[in-house]
């Protein structure tokens, strides 16, 4: 198939899933065309069957705000025409699904282009519900030839929040379990924890919804009982405030902010525990990548997290903001080697048996084919 993918190229779950999907589809012989305003984060190596088309946004003094959605629609229409696309797959509804719809309108009735929209999270649970966007998001969902959500939670939330009746298929996120597998004691581990301290890790885009400050408070409690280090990977609006917080509570010598990193399998292989105290999480891809590296996760029970983490088996789940409990769970795992080993193995097992690439990507292929055949 000839597949166009539209996504955010930035450090965020939807862009990561879109890019990993594109790479996997290209490996399986499809022609995959990324259409976005910058090279997606994880599209950093040449691969056969993969193409990147940059959306240029003309600057004109009359436009106080750049018209990205419209430039994107024109570009999708162009790429669809010249590359003979069968499918345009929009990741994150705003504005991608709307631009995809507009591109189809530009191409006209004779065009064979079909649209698939994947809903990822905040496009439904947060910003998409804003009255300024809600009618547009609902419209784009109704008009897509097929819609998927990354968890059962998100599919339900879409139906109730947007009052849509159409079918929404659940296709879970996935992980390359060969790449994301535990490596033996890494140079990174020796540097960060020279005295064999335990390593707690958090990876995110540091948006308020991730509650990174809770991560720091949880760690402060763990540190009272277990010699440990906290490693924070990623960057975003709350990072500076979290740096300040760790200084203020006097634990900054034990906390490392690494910023955006690409060697995630190596970093995760050094971790003993992953913390995800999010306020909202439609799936929790970072938790899945940690689990694939044999890292148990302590998280909140929000959104789709319980569809990924099995409480008491491969991680622990607590109420939003229950720092005491999350710290208690963390200490329990970090001080009981046998229990940690069982949780670590179960985490890896779940990633491999439920969420590995070759289980999930064929579900997208089937969906594309059914939409094309319609
Ligand atoms: O808002 C974010 O945290 C990023 C967001 C995105 O769409 O870029 O991530 C969402 O999509 C990921 C991939 O499907 C999911 O794993 C995340 O749970 C989800 N984030 C939220 O729901 C907050």
Image (cartoon, rainbow, N blue to C red):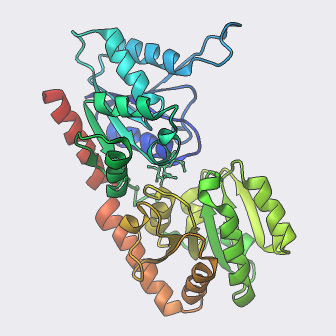
* Residue 71 horizontal side relative to residue 22, left or right: right
User: Which quarter shows the N terminus?
Assistant: top left
Nearest the viewer among 238 and 367 is 238
Question: Do we see residue 140 in this rendering?
Answer: yes
Residue at screen point 36% across, 29% down? 140
State the residue at coordinates (45%, 40%).
19
x and y, in percent, of residue 257 in the image: 74, 60
Of residues 120 and 183, which is closer to you in this image?
A: 120
Give how far across and how far down residue 9 sits, in percent.
Answer: 54, 36
**Splitting the image into 4 quarters, where does residue 201 fall?**
bottom right
Say if 343 sits above or below 182 in the image: below
Q: Relative to residue 344, is residue 244 drawn left or right?
A: right
Identify the residue shown where x is 29% and y is 47%: 361
Q: How many marks?
A: 0
Specify whether 161 is left or right of 251: left
Q: Position of residue 164 (x, y in %)?
A: 29, 40
């Amino acid at each position: 198939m000839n597949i166009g993918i539209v996504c955010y190229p930035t450090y965020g779950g939807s862009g990561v899933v879109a890019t990993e999907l594109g790479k996997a589809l290209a490996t399986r012989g499809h022609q995959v065309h990324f259409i976005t305003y910058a090279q997606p984060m994880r599209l950093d190596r040449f691969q056969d069957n993969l193409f990147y088309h940059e959306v240029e946004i003309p600057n004109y003094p009359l436009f106080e705000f750049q018209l990205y959605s419209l430039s994107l629609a024109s570009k999708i229409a162009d790429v669809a025409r010249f590359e003979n696309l069968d499918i345009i797959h929009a990741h994150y509804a705003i504005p991608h699904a709307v631009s995809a719809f507009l591109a189809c309108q530009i191409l006209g009735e004779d065009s064979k282009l079909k649209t698939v929209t994947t809903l990822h999270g905040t496009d439904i649970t947060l910003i998409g519900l804003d009255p300024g966007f809600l009618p547009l998001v609902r419209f784009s969902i109704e008009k897509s030839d097929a819609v998927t959500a990354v968890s059962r939670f998100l599919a339900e939330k879409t139906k109730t929040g947007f009052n849509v009746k159409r079918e929404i298929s659940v296709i879970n996120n996935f992980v390359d379990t060969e790449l994301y597998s535990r490596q033996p004691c890494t140079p990174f581990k020796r540097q960060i924890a020279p005295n064999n301290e335990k390593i707690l890790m958090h990876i995110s885009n540091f948006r308020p919804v991730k509650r990174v400050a809770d991560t720091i408070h949880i760690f402060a409690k763990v540190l009272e009982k277990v010699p440990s280090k906290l490693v924070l990977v990623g960057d975003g609006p709350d990072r500076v405030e979290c740096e300040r917080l760790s200084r203020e509570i006097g634990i900054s010598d034990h906390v490392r902010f690494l910023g955006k990193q690409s060697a995630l399998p190596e970093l995760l292989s050094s971790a003993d525990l992953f913390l995800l105290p999010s306020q909202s999480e439609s799936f929790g891809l970072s938790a899945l990548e940690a689990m694939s590296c044999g890292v148990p996760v302590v998280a909140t029970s929000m959104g789709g997290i319980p569809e990924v983490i099995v409480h008491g088996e491969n991680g622990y789940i607590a109420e939003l903001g229950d720092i005491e409990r999350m710290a208690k769970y963390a200490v329990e795992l970090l001080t009981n080697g046998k229990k940690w080993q069982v949780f670590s193995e179960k985490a890896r097992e779940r990633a491999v048996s439920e969420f590995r690439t070759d289980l999930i990507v064929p579900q997208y292929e089937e969906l594309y084919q059914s939409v094309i055949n319609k």
